[in-house]
Image (cartoon, grey):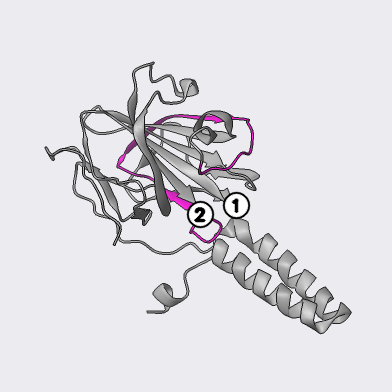
Amino acid sequence: MWRRALPPIHPDGWRFILIFAAVTLILFWIAQPLGWLGVIATIWCVTFFRNPWRVTPQREGLVVAPADGVVVAVDEAVPPPELGMGAAPMRRIGIFLSIFDVHVNRVPAAGRVVKTAYRKGKFVNAALDKASEDNERMAIRLALADGAEIAVVQIAGLIARRILCELTEGQSVIAGQRLGLIRFGSRTDLYLPLSWSHFAIVGQRMVGGETVLADTRANESARSGMVH
């Protein structure tokens, strides 16, 4: 119960939490009302770096969301050229992470890391489609057991200034495994073969490591959604 109520903190966050706490003490010393603003900011910093436990479906053929957030794009696009996956378009599912979402990214499906590639870029609003092309990013190419390949791309946002990827080339991974962190607001793109049935709808909220985005064994058309 305590693991659910009090999720662990990502190691990358402790120094920021300590900085926020130190500034809060200084603000209390300067003027008490400012100190309470610091308390609020420190609480936010703690929640930003939360690293919750997730229950990931492990059946072969399932692809889970690589990040928490809202789906802002479901379209066709060529994967990042630095991954060497060719010029054929794939199904791209873009997930926008606000500053209030969990920012720990997760592996969408079991397989092997074929390549990781970092590219410098801009820091425009991650909710915009051009962020996938223009912004700083870390791209990850995964080979699945059946020979298919997919890609996950960590993309910096308007105020994001650090992308952390914990995977190495040649590493074997499982679905739901933590792969890294983007600090702070950001976007995560997932590239899938066009032939796969996907279940993502623009506006849908994702739970990283739990929400099923696609099923290689399914045979159904794309879904539509309705806001209630």
For label 2, the SS is loop
Q: Which mark is residue 103?
A: 2
Residue at the (61%, 39%) spot, across then down: 124
Residue 51 falls inside the magenta stretch: no
Q: Quadrant of residue 137?
A: top right
What amino acid is labelled 1 in the image?
A: Phe
Camera-side residue: 72 or 188? 72
**Label pair 2/1, CB-CB below 8 angstroms:** yes
Amino acid type assigned to the residue bearing label 2 in the image? His
Nearer-N-terminus badge (2/1): 2
* Residue at screen point 30% across, 42% down: 109
Q: Which residue is mark 1?
A: 184
Q: Is residue 122 magenta?
A: yes
Q: Where's residue 105, x and y in %?
A: 45, 49
Q: Is residue 98 above or below residue 214?
A: below
Extent of the magenta region = 98-127
> Residue 85, percent across and down?
38, 20
Tell which of 146 and 129 is nearer to you: 129
Question: What separation in Å lies between label 2 and label 1 (alpha carbons)?
Answer: 7 Å
Residue located at (64% from left, 63% from top): 14
Residue 200, image x, y percentages: 29, 45
